[in-house]
Amino acid sequence: MKIRSIIPLFIFLLTPFFVHATHQRAGEITYLHINGLTYEITVVTYTYSISQADRCELEVIWGDGSASVIPRVNGPAGINPGGMYCDHLGEIVDTLIRKNVYSAQHTFASAGEFIISVEDPNRNYGVINIPNSVNVPLYVDTKLLINPFLGTNSSPQLTLPPIDKGCVEHPFIHNAGAYDPDGDSLSYELVACRGTSGMEIPGYTLPEASNSFTINPVTGDILWDYPVMQGEYNIAFIIKEWRNGVPIGYVTRDMQIIITSCDNEAPQIETISDTCIMAGETLELQVTATDADNDKIKLVGSGGPILAPESPAVFPESTEGMGTVTAPFVWNTQCSHVRYNPWQLYFKATDNSSPVNLSDIMTLQITVIGPPPQPTDIQPIGNTLTLQWLPYSCPNAQSIRIYRREGSYPYSYGACETGVPEESGYILADEVPADGMPSFTDHNNGMGLIHGIDYCYRLTALFPDGAESYVSEEICASLKKDLPVITHVSVEKTDPYSGKIRVQWAKPTELDYQVTPGPFKYILYRSNHTLGTPFLAVDSLNTLTDTLLMDTDINTSAYQFAYFIEFINDTPGNRFTIGMTQIAQSPLLSITPTDRQLNLSWEAGVPWNNSTYDLFRYNEITTTWDSLTTISQPYWADTGLINGKPYCYLIRTRGSYSASGIISPILNHSQEACGTPIDNIPPCPVVLSVHTDCDKLENHLAWTNPLHACGTEVSRYVIYAAPDQLTNFQAIDSINNPNDTTYIHHFDQAITGCYFIIGVDETLNRSAPSNTVCIPHDTCSVYQLPNVFTPNNDGYNDIFTPFPYTSIEKAEAEILNRWGQVIFRTDDPNLNWDGRDQSTNKECATGVYFYVINLHEITLQGLIQRTISGQVHLLRE
């Protein structure tokens, strides 16, 4: 052990001064809802037990603009270390450590968000990671949200104390043992310790670790891996409450960790996996801890199951053993224990080694799940099914959910699997109150169920917090076969005038002849589904076994037709409609042409399930229909075709009802449809770049070839240009060679402009425009003048004229002498002043002359006026 590691603790224990100066070690605030807007607030602090700064009372800031001094409520009466009488002195829980509980009720005036806080002026001396800790207050707060839309709320209750001990170079673990009375979700987060007015303490740091100092955001386990120096440390963390994904409050714990030097190892609790159990069953666990040093071990448990108000779990308050200790955990779960979030259970094993007791903590999560509802019967009535079940065994359930699917899907749920898995194909059909009649009639939202389908149901119970029970056993049934069931609506002939559709159905086989003695009649109704025309009767059949009708002389080339059958009891003097079938549509094939490809899609609204589709293409050579493929999706692309050549197709659907006794597979044909592939895919856009030649006043355009960039061909390019960003683009030229990807745009005076390119292929498909490139007026030299010229006729610098420039349309220039008299005026941007007075044609004297020029510049924003002024030296040598 290094000497530097023991000095701080040694001084702390031996120096008398510290006895009077130290006080607060740890603290937290929790609350319980009493009724209405009244809450019971509890402040727990741990202090230096012989400090004269002991508090009989503590001030609490309520967060609503008020404060109260609340009393300590634990421990016997007597004189405290400061010489004051207290009704309660707190409890001595360890050497020099006192536990203090302060409690009071407070009624808030209204709903809102309140930060309840306590600030005590004295921390204890020598906290290593808090500079000058004896002069730093301890501040903790708790957030209370009163919101009638979220319901009442009590804060998490912390069951394990905020004082803990560890050893140098040994992993340290701590858990607050948080339990939420309302079953809300909890999350955990490390924060900085705070002092005066709730501000973060300057210089505060997390304790130094060899590896890491972390908190598990789900379980709240704090792991210090591992301490490197002896002493006292303080850390803080918040426990947030979540309800339906909404944060509703938090509790802050400021705790102290005392690290010493030791040679022994902490005890270890054998791992127990998180588990789930059905309400009403008993959970029994054996919890075992062992100590490598064969020290005496004390094993305790805490957490929600043990604190549950109804049928709490049983675990010995304290079990001890030498080297090994085992204790039974038993929980007779009840319906009241069912909740969405798991219950957290904490086991702590502590040895009695010297000089410090080391501990291990294990966090266990237990989810209590509602039992499955128990369906008892299902009966068909007309086009509905009535499902019944036993009254649900948990009175605190909110509703019963009814799930339905077509056909059976047997499966077994896992121990922690609630509700109905999505992959089962079950959908939520309805939800009814759990305390209502234990039955449900399924009429498919008023549309009626379909004859010929096996309907299967499963039930779950839903609880107020969103917890869902285990799923029930599956129960299945189908409607009575007391109506005809359509099986075929198949195109037999494709023709715009003499088309033919075969409509076929299965006859009813479960007729009640007491109610419907017959004879019977079928009436077939048809609608042009494509045009949305009303259904009209097209034929009738008077024999029960006559189940086929050919609908002729209709346009099957262009339209899809829909049918249903009215089934009539035709007893003389007692004629009435027994019922009607579901609507069934003929398959309609659509073809969309594209480049060397035809995209096929089809639809057919039918009461049975079409599972696969057979595709056929007409062979002009053999004059037969070739089978192409069988697929499960109602679309397909026929590729590698020849543009301009027609191809013809038809589709055969394959389907079935899930109930027995009906023909399977059910085969129906679409109309014959033809399409011709065409090149309607535009070339990909080119990428344009522009380079300006200022000497020649030319913009050089260059772009990519779509054939090289993306494999699409072009036959020509169209160049678009605009003189500025305010003017519409116009086509200025085209290039008919697809390999020629450059163009030169020449100007007389301006290089300003914007460009884009479009590629066009042989079938006149136009690409999207390329990127737009704009050339601003200052790409080349802007208008500038020299500051001296010598009009002495030597052929050099004889004229006052600008340096080379571009993009000037005109200029309004005046040259003045030193007295402000205008001696030269011109509209020519080149000026060309020869040094003479324009009015007298006399040579101007050597000297300084001034100019003012209004320039009209050609820019991307249009024609813009800019005024420049300056001076020029006229020299005559």
Image (cartoon, rainbow, N blue to C red):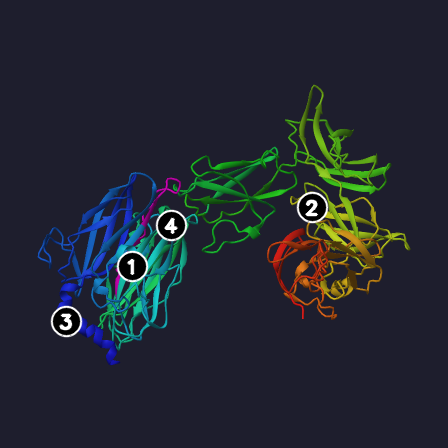
Where residue 325 appears, x then y in whole percent?
27, 67
Earlier residue among tags 3 and 4: 3
Q: Amino acid at mark 3?
A: Thr
- Foreground: disc 1 or disc 2: 1
Magenta segment, which residues?
A: 143-164
Where residue 457 appears, x then y in whole percent?
55, 44
Say which residue label 4 marks.
184
- Foreground: disc 4 or disc 1: 1
Earlier residue among tags 3 and 2: 3
Res. 399 image quadrant:
top left
- Foreground: disc 3 or disc 2: 3
Where residue 148 appears, x then y in whole percent?
37, 39
Earlier residue among tags 4 and 1: 4
Task: State how far apart marks 2 and 4 are (Cα).
Answer: 48 Å
Say which residue label 3 marks.
15
Say which residue label 1 marks.
194
Earlier residue among tags 1 and 3: 3
Task: State how far apart marks 3 and 4 are (Cα).
Answer: 47 Å
Q: Amino acid at mark 2?
A: Ser
Query: Can residue 41 be seen in this snapshot?
Result: yes
Task: State how far apart marks 1 and 3 are (Cα).
Answer: 27 Å
